[in-house]
Image (tube, rainbow, N blue to C red):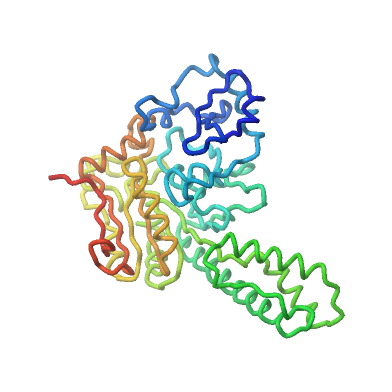
């Protein structure tokens, strides 16, 4: 969104529209011409009757589009107070913490990570399995993950194909340990006259409020000059763990080659552990990063490398296997088919106190499809009954309003 005052300074070629419910602002979708891969997914996917974007040859519009982008990118970020962040519309008013990735044009994986970053990005910690998500996620010398104006953003690290789930679990244990140390140090402030009135409510459910309270406490403590040696040690400890006022949102991310095959033993161990982590499986149904070989996620009869006559075994049902534990949140999603269902799954997974597994259908260039229609392919897969959308939340009451199992696919009858 752009304020009316800033609109007065805009290039004449910048097209804006009134922002819905925000009469003080204008709304604009501005493409970066030097980062656009030309896949056309955004234009094809737009649900509006009159498309918001259209594809044109680069040389026809590059100069004016670059001027528009430079203008928009230097404006202060306007955060909408109208739409809730945890909705499809509200999340899109948040600058993504996952920017230009350099993935294949029309990649079916990256949109999932981009939206999750808009929902939770400033407190995400990502354990990433080797594969496509490590190539576009952290290839030197650039990385698409970024930070906001306050310096907050996702922490990202890559692990081996075979042990990424354990890697993420280790991060979770370390984070929990550091958070406990911080809480103990803050509570110990009550023992000293200089700081007995200082406290933080760690039960505060609003992470933003808790972060602000933590920053205020640290600033106050660093302005003190206590003579008490023990108090100095407590303040030093709080400074050491000051990034742990808000519990991180742990995300273990990888493809089907990792989750279904090579890293499955570790994944199964973490699902059975009861650890409060989120797992995102970007399911392309083949080994995408190495050329499209069949994996245990490849469906029966599919032609792939090493399965040129068609795969002879059924697809491994990772979702059904996870649900057998009865204490794991499980969802199968396809953003191009149902954006609301995907956002709901992410929000529910984040709130779930235990392992949460989201399996996301991700069309790939190795499928031999037109990647300009990768989001449309997801809708086709769901509408045809090939890919089912559902959410399984064992903490729900099992009522009509709060079912344990919710089938979100359209009625095929």
Please state, as top left, top right, bottom left or bottom right, where the C terminus lies in the image. Answer: top left
Q: Nearer the viewer, residue 34 or 216?
A: 216
- Taking 404 as reference, is 74 left or right? right
The answer to whether 86 appears left or right of 410 in the picture is: right
Residue 220 figure quarter: bottom right
Relative to 307, is 129 above or below?
Answer: below
Residue 289 spot, x, y in % from top left: 44, 43
Question: Which image quarter: residue 393?
Answer: bottom left
Q: Which residue is depicted at the point 56% across and 26% down?
A: 33
In this view, which residue lies farthest toward the bottom? 191
Badge count: 0
Q: Report the residue that reaches farthest toward the top.
A: 60
User: Is residue 56 positioned above or below 116 on the image?
Assistant: above
Residue 150, image x, y percentages: 67, 51
In percent of width and height, residue 114 lies at: 49, 45
Question: Quick one: which residue is furthest to the left in this view?
Answer: 413
Residue at (43, 46) in percent of width and height? 112
- Residue at image x 38%, y 53%? 344
Q: Going by the picture, which residue comes out furthest to the front?
A: 23
- Where does the N terminus fall, quadrant-wise? top right
Location of residue 116 in the rendering, given as x and y in whole percent from the top left corner: 47, 50
């Amino acid at each position: 969104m752009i304020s009316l005052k800033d609109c007065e300074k805009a290039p004449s070629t910048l097209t804006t529209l009134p922002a819905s419910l925000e009469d003080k602002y204008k709304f604009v979708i501005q493409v970066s011409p030097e980062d656009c891969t030309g896949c056309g997914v955004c234009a094809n996917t737009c649900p509006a009757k009159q498309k918001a974007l259209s594809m044109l040859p680069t040389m026809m519009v590059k100069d004016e589009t670059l001027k528009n982008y430079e203008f928009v990118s230097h404006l202060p970020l306007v955060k909408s107070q109208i739409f809730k962040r945890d909705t499809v519309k509200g999340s899109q008013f948040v600058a993504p913490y996952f920017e230009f990735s350099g993935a294949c044009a029309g990649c079916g994986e990256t949109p999932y990570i981009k939206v999750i970053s808009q929902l939770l990005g400033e407190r995400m910690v990502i354990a990433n399995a080797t594969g496509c998500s490590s190539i576009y996620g952290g290839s030197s010398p650039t990385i698409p993950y970024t930070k906001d104006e306050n310096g907050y953003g996702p922490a990202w690290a890559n692990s081996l194909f075979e042990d990424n789930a354990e890697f993420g679990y280790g991060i979770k244990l370390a984070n929990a340990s550091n958070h406990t140390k911080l809480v103990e140090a803050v509570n110990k402030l009550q023992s000293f006259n200089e700081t007995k009135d200082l406290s933080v409510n760690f039960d505060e459910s609003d992470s933003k409020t808790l972060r602000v309270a933590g920053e205020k406490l640290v600033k106050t403590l660093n302005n003190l000059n206590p003579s008490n040696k023990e108090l100095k040690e407590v303040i030093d400890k709080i400074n050491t763990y000051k990034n742990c006022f808000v519990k991180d949102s742990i995300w273990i991310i990888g493809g089907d080659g990792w989750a279904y095959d090579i890293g499955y033993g570790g994944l199964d161990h973490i699902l059975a552990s009861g650890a409060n982590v989120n797992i995102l499986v970007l399911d392309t149904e083949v080994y995408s990063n190495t050329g499209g070989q069949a994996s245990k996620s490849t469906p029966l009869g599919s032609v792939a490398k090493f399965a040129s006559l068609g795969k002879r075994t059924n697809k491994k049902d990772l979702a059904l296997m996870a649900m057998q534990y009865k204490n794991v949140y499980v969802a199968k999603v396809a953003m191009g088919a149902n954006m609301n269902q995907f956002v709901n799954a992410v929000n529910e997974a984040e709130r779930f106190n235990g392992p949460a597994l989201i399996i996301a259908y991700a069309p790939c260039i190795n499928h031999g499809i037109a990647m300009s229609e990768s989001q449309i392919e997801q809708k086709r897969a769901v509408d045809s009954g090939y890919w089912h959308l559902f959410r399984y939340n064992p903490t729900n009451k099992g009522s009509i309003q709060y079912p344990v199992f919710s089938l979100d696919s359209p009625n095929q009858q």
